[in-house]
Amino acid sequence: MDREQKAALVRRQKYFVFGDVFVFAAALLLIAALTAFAFLAPREEGNSFTVWYDGRAVFTASLAEDAVYVFTVGSGSVVRYEEGADHEAYNIIEVADGKVRVREADCRSQDCVHRGAADWGEIVCLPHSMRIEINGEEAQPPVDY
Amino acid sequence: MLAAAALALAGALFTGCAENVDSFIEYSLSDELYVDGQRISSYEYAELAADVGDLIAETEALFDAEAEGSDVFRINAAAAGEAVTVDARTYALLSLCKQLYAETDGAFTPALYDLSELWGFTPAYEGRYSDPRPQPSAEAVAEALTHSDFSGVTLGAGNTVTKADGETKIDLGGVAKGYMTDLVSALIEERYAGHTVEYSAEVMSNLILAGGKHDSGSVRGYNIGITDPRAATTGTAQGLYLTSVRDAAISTSSDAYRFYVYEGNIYSHIIDPHTGAPSQNGVISVTVCVPLSAEYAGARADAYSTAGFCMPLTDALAFYARLAEEYGVTAVVITQDFCYYTVGSGTVLNRKEYADYIGSPLTVENVYTFAEISSASDTVARCEQEEAYIAYIAGLH
């Protein structure tokens, strides 16, 4: 068809033809399926967590062992926390009853603290570029096969 | 339903390699396939992967003892003295079996179909680890053993197979998957004849690695995780690691796949041809790495890991030492006292060593303990973790 005919079709709004219904139906079905998957998929409780800082994994520990760790911005180190010790630019990470939470932090937003204790998903501290990822499986060093 | 559909779709979109799980044989061909250092296009890969799929399906149809009309089915059904004409690939595999049978003094034999049946290693029992099975009588085992002599199978001109004993039945389970990796390898090498091809493929715990692993601009050896045979209770996916592997076929035989627990003992699908019973030598996993310079490296790795699994520990270690000398084989043997032995020049790392080696921030624990070959003994006692594993499996329903 030439430009004229095309323009005429558009003018008559004939571009949406019957067959398109299937395309939209398929798209809607896909959205519904993905939404259902997101909400219905069983959430497996994690049994370890990894601390990511600046795009690299800096620390991994088990959720089975109750412990308190402290993460420090800059060095990206995560070490056992000694109660009462003073830190700057830090997040205190606590593991208890198979869950991990940020107990205390000196970041601006405090979003990480408000996230509470979790045994799935992740806890993010944007101001400190720190992320705690909860692993479904016991974390393993990567292999090629 | 919708969730499943979405998952399937997501899987189809993001899978990095061709996998086939519908068929009994699971295989994969990595899409990281390089010809003269250049990665092939996804279109070219898709075409090749489809051909590999056809090849696996074709050969499975030849070797499947349960499929009526298959080569193996017809051999098994044949009477004494009746010549059965088989496909050239079946004939080549049986010829190789003859060679391996001689080389391993009968520790590797494909003539154990009856005994596998007798011990209940049939598809009906797949995955039912704690079901008690009919324990065959000593007489039944002795009777089956008399018909399990592979030397009575003769390979003749024109791809013919003849049995001296009509009751002898073949089961290629201990070598077929490794051989399939050899056939995949031959298909790829033929398609890119005159070029250097790098690829990796896997057929049910049989791995073939041609060339190295392309990793952020450079090429290195592959790091292979040896599946922890006690993962069910240790929670670790990999028990040990083989590092810097190139141009090799790797196969693992373990008692953690197709097995059952009965009265506190593990009965694995690997039948000891000398006793006619599931192998119980205290060995729980054997991994064998055969350089591709050896002809039929894939089939060899498969058969060697099966053969060593049935041997008393010291015999197995001596057997692999001989193969290390002859073909450059590396072997890793894990025993039920949670020790491991290594033979050959390949690098085998424990969990902590591996985490250090790749610079992983993970804190890992070793599961198995390195043991010197000189300390090996044919009587291997079960350790506490092994008892706990058996109790755990026995409690599964």
Image (cartoon, coloured by chain):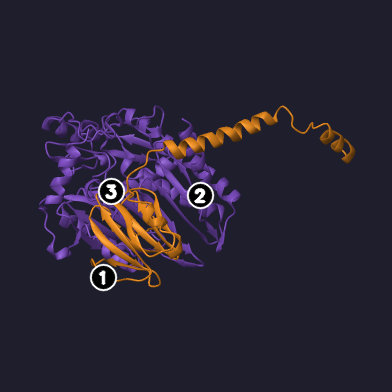
Chain colours: A orange, B purple
Q: Which disc, if any, is residue B187?
A: 2
Quadrant containing the C terminus of chain B is top left
Of all chains, the one bearing label 3 is B
Residue drawn where x is 13% and y is 60% of the image: B376
Residue A25 lies, in percent from the top left, at 61, 30
- The crowding category of the residue bearing disc 2, from other C-alpha atoms within 10 Å (few below 14, some 14 to 19, many at least 20), is some
The residue singled out by tag 3 in the image is B253
Secondary structure at numbered mark 3: strand
Query: In the figure, is residue B50 to the left or right of B300?
Result: right
Which of B341/B114 is in front? B341
Mark 3 or mark 2, earlier in chain: 2
- Closer to the eye: label 1 or 2: 1
Q: CA gap, disc 1 to disc 2?
A: 65 Å
Residue drawn where x is 12% and y is 30% of the image: B137
**Quarter assignment of residue A24:** top right
* Amino acid bearing label 1: Ala
The answer to the question of whether label 3 and label 2 lie on touching residues, with beta carbons closer than 8 A, is: no
The residue singled out by tag 1 in the image is A85
Residue B213 lies, in percent from the top left, at 45, 62
Secondary structure at numbered mark 2: helix
* Amino acid bearing label 2: Leu
Q: Is residue A57 above or below residue B86?
A: below
Taking the image as drawn, is residue B86 in sight?
Answer: no
Residue A26 lies, in percent from the top left, at 60, 32
Which of B10/B42 is in front? B10
Query: In the figure, is residue B332 to the left or right of B209?
Result: left
Which of A126/B85 is in front? A126
